[in-house]
Image: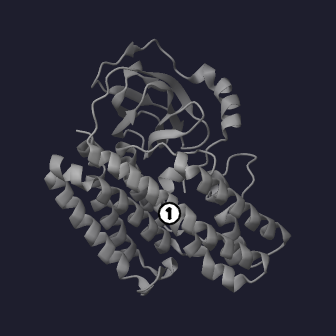
Amino acid sequence: MRAVRLSVVTAAATAAALTAVTGCTEKSDAKNGDAIQVTAADSTCDTSAKTVPAGQVTLKIENKGSKATEVEIVFPDDRIVSEKENIGPGTKYTLTAEVKAGSYEIACRPGMKGHGVRQKLTVTGGKVAKRDPRLDKAVAAYREYAQEQADATLPKAEAFAKSVKDGDMEAAKKAFADSRLGWERTEPVAESFGDIDPKVDVREDGLEDGQKWTGWHRLEKALWHDKKIGAEEKTLADQLVTDLKDWQKRVGKAEITPSSMANGAKELLDEVATGKVTGEEDRYSHTDLTDFKGNVEGAQKAYELLKPVAQENDAALTTELDKQFTALDTLLDKYRTDKSSYVFTSYDKVGKADRKELSDAVNALAEPLSKLAAAVVK
């Protein structure tokens, strides 16, 4: 789950309203290999270049604002090329992406909500370095994996929705966590479309003003907190399936590159750190560890596909990643109540010390995982 993103139509209207605060200054062109300096603040997003050659693009980001921010490279229709969420005040981060010739925007989203403050970025044609064919194979395999996860999610979501519509609260509760696994494994791909995640996976505290709350977490609250299934919940169950079918159809069109796979793996660990470990994600059902496991599995899949190239470029990094993935997987398995399925200990039963142990293991993996993109595109 990420902070809500506005629809493309709403985003266009918001962009016009934000023109006065974009902090635009005349920018230079970046040469091949030059990093673009991105300075984010509470109402501005300043970039050091407005034009860059096609190929590898590096953003050197610094958040000088008072809120955590998110920085993205996006297409004009709001599809995400690459992003970094939850960049805290005073924090710096380096984001590496691969871009083809065309028109893009660099977006800073203070508070990680809304359309954000944007700067235009033109990527010019020219020679793009020939890519290792192993990376093309990795992208193709990951695209297939993402489609498989979406395809497998639909029948599980339909079973969950049917239980809701039948008024069978216990069956719906039992189906809830399993219906989310495929989504959690490939969440960065789903989020790249911009408009689907806010419909199916937003939490109540992530809603924008005027946004109707729909999706898994709205139904989660009805089942565990409100303890009721009414006409509205049954309608929302149908809407969830409709929105997930939209996701399923669009997965094959997602923009996927080796660097977006690597950055997406890190994003999945960030999802764990900011939502699952804290218990905020599934705050009513306490099924956070199932989501947690899905995020880790998705990150590990992307890493394993990229590993042959990363290992050649940075063997020490892959050795550390192997070690930390194994450690986190082993730790998570301690909480499985059924070793043959994805049933885990209810997260409200996991004590403070154990949560810290989980958090430490996530952080130990996230740090080397943040270096994967650079190792892949060397």
Residue 29, quarter of the rendered image:
top left
Residue furthest bottom as drawn: 338
Q: Is residue 323 above or below residue 143?
A: below
Give the crowd class for mark 1: few <14, some 14-19, many >=20 residues within 10 Å: some
Q: Position of residue 266 (x, y in %)?
A: 37, 53
Q: Position of residue 324 (x, y in %)?
A: 25, 65
Choose between 105 and 141: the one closer to the eye: 141
Q: Quick one: quadrant of the N terminus?
A: bottom right
Question: Is residue 49 something that shows in the picture?
Answer: no
Q: Position of residue 272 (x, y in %)?
A: 43, 62
- At horizontal 35% and vertical 43% (from top left) the residue drawn is 259
Q: Is residue 308 above or below residue 255?
A: below
In this figure, which residue is indicated by the disc labeled 1? 148
Judge left or right: residue 336 versus residue 229.
left
- At horizontal 63% and vertical 51% (from top left) the residue drawn is 196
Judge left or right: residue 76 versus residue 220.
left
Q: Is residue 141 above or below residue 290?
A: above
Give the mark count: 1
Question: Is residue 163 something that shows in the picture?
Answer: yes
Residue furthest right as drawn: 231
Judge left or right: residue 199 versus residue 145.
right
Q: Position of residue 285 (x, y in %)?
A: 60, 75
Choose between 255 and 141: the one closer to the eye: 141
Q: Quick one: quadrant of the C terminus?
A: top left
- At horizontal 36% and vertical 70% (from top left) the residue drawn is 358
Q: Amino acid at mark 1?
A: Glu
Model colouring: one colour
Choose between 285 and 144: the one closer to the eye: 144
Residue 359, quarter of the rendered image:
bottom left
- At horizontal 26% and vertical 70% (from top left) the residue drawn is 326
Give SS at disc 1.
Answer: helix
